[in-house]
Image (cartoon, rainbow, N blue to C red):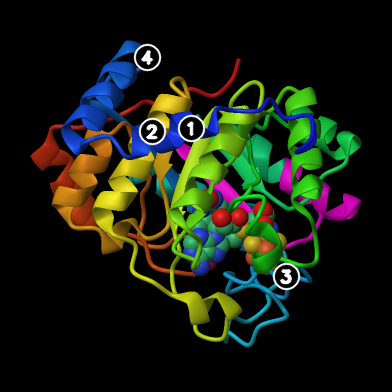
Amino acid sequence: MSAATARPAAETRARGLYDLPLPELMFRAQAVHRAHFDACSVETAQLLSIKTGGCPEDCGYCSQSAHHDTGVAATRLMDVEAVLAEARKAKAGGAARFCMGAAWRAPKDRDLDAVCAMISGVRALGLETCVTLGMLTPVQVDRLSAAGLDYYNHNVDTSPAYYPRITSTRTLDDRLETLGHVRAGGIKVCCGGIVGMGETIEDRLAMLELLAGLDPHPESVPLNMWTPIEGTPVKAFEEKVDPIAFVRLVAVARLLMPRSVVRLSAGRHTLSDEAQALCFLAGANSIFVGDTLLTTPNMEESRDAVLLARLGLRPAPAQPSA
Ligand code: SAM
Ligand code: DTB
Ligand code: SF4
């Protein structure tokens, strides 16, 4: 799969939807959401950084790139037992999926032994599994699949036009190639991006069109609002994303990818409870739970518990692949 072979999506459709009066956009998104999902249920995922910092890639938004002086210390890959202890805590805290992230350009084959042990251990706890490890070869995908991996997270991050402004050490086609291997290996695809890095609304919609042009659509679509990190190049573009613009984007994602789970990811804690409620009404149906994401804070667990109770939303049970 490459940018050239991805199914072209209707550019005008995304813009036409985005510009609808909000009540009309929300009504359409709700109708599509309810046709495919229980609108009162929300998926819960918890993240753990299993190998932090020192990454050779230069992603301009990221605290973990060795190219930026962000104060995030590089660590070695965690021990399997330490990861499983965190997974048990996540399960006890109510998470259905456990996502493990490593700051690598690509995993080394010897690191994959430990990651595969983590995946099978997390799965044995009855949690869905997701990892994000950078670029993969088809052989590495097969090893992850054999370990029982449910999802692989690998984001397109932004529009094709804006991508070179954000990362120079790899291309969007590199990213799409790994996604093609993941798909061919039978692992579910988790793929989304970031808003608030100085891109235009057109870029945001082009990113959604790129995702909706993948065939089949990613099963999971994380939408991140950029979390400001001192020392990163993207800091210069920092902008506060208009919450209503974000709600519109969620609704367009729901309409373009009706069966994909849309996850409110980084930056959720910066939204008011009311803005988050609008995101759920627009078709978002997954969140990261737990007090931290990878290196930055998440919405506090206590605030999440109150929010879900106020909105009457139920956490969805884990559904590891058979
Ligand atoms: N190295 C792996 C990779 O690049 O796929 C995994 C880790 S990376 C941190 C996972 C995703 O987190 C990125 O693709 C990006 O979308 C998101 N992300 C990273 N830093 C962020 C930030 N400061 N604000 C919002 N999202 C961020
Ligand atoms: C994704 O799209 N968002 C998550 C997950 N995939 C791996 C990561 C968010 C990271 C936010 C910045 C940090 O905590 O370092
Ligand atoms: Fe490395 Fe991933 Fe951060 Fe890019 S986003 S610098 S690949 S950890």
Badge 4 marks a residue whose secondary structure is helix
Q: Is residue 237 left or right of residue 290?
A: right
Q: Earlier in the sequence, mark 3 or mark 2?
A: 2
Q: Position of residue 216 (x, y in %)?
A: 64, 21
Instruction: Calculate the distance from the C-alpha at mark 3 to the C-alpha at mark 4.
Output: 41 Å
Q: Position of residue 74 (x, y in %)?
A: 68, 77
Instruction: Calculate the distance from the C-alpha at mark 1 to the C-alpha at mark 3.
Output: 46 Å
Q: Is residue 238 left or right of residue 133?
A: left
Residue position marked by numbered label 1 in the rendering: 12
Instruction: Calculate the distance from the C-alpha at mark 3 to the C-alpha at mark 2.
Output: 47 Å
What is the magenta range? Answer: 95-116
Residue for point 19% across, 42% down = 277
Reply yes or no: does residue 51 show up in magenta. no
Q: Earlier in the sequence, mark 4 or mark 1?
A: 1
The label shown at residue 36 is 4
Q: Nearer the viewer, mark 4 or mark 2?
A: 2
